[in-house]
Amino acid sequence: MAEAIVGPLVGKLQEMAVSEAKALVAVNDDIRGLRDRLMWMQAFLRHADPRRRDTSDELIRVWLKQTRDVAFDAEDAIDDYSLKVDLSSKKLRCNDLPAR
């Protein structure tokens, strides 16, 4: 009788573990993609920023501004994500404490 209850729970936990692992892989891929894009943006900014004063090209100035804005947005998103992960980790550790 107890096995009839526990068996499906084990299966559900396995499904949850697989789902969590897939989500972690997807997040890891997203982080790598974001890192690569930020590296390109950094290279562009290093190359173009010193030249912005030497050029009257409005396109370069707009592109520089937008690239900087996107970089700041990405930094904010990374900070938010890091904070959520940290808070989630602390919450999990608090749940491990014995109840009084």
Image: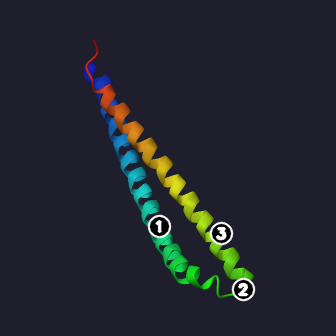
Quadrant of image for the N terminus: top left
Nearer the viewer's eye, disc 3 or disc 2?
2
- On the rendered structure, is 24 left or right of 10? right
Residue situated furthest front in the rendering:
53
Q: Residue at x 53, y 73 (%)?
A: 41
Q: Which residue is mark 1?
A: 33
Q: Residue 96: horizontal and vertical position, in percent?
A: 28, 27
Q: Amino acid at mark 1?
A: Gly
Nearer the viewer's eye, disc 2 or disc 1?
2
Q: CA distance from mark 3 to mark 2?
A: 15 Å
Q: Is residue 97 above or below residue 78?
A: above
Q: Which residue is mark 2?
A: 57
Asked whether 4 or 84 is in front, the reply is: 84
Q: Is residue 10 above or below residue 17?
A: above
Q: Residue at x 42, y 51 (%)?
A: 23
Q: Which residue is mark 3?
A: 66
Q: Secondary structure at mark 2?
A: loop
Of callouts 2 and 1, the N-terminal one:
1
Q: Residue 17: horizontal and vertical position, in percent?
A: 34, 43
Q: CA distance from mark 2 to mark 1?
A: 30 Å
CB of mark 1 within 8 Å of CB of mark 3?
Answer: no
Quadrant of image for the C terminus: top left
Q: Is residue 78 above or below residue 56?
A: above
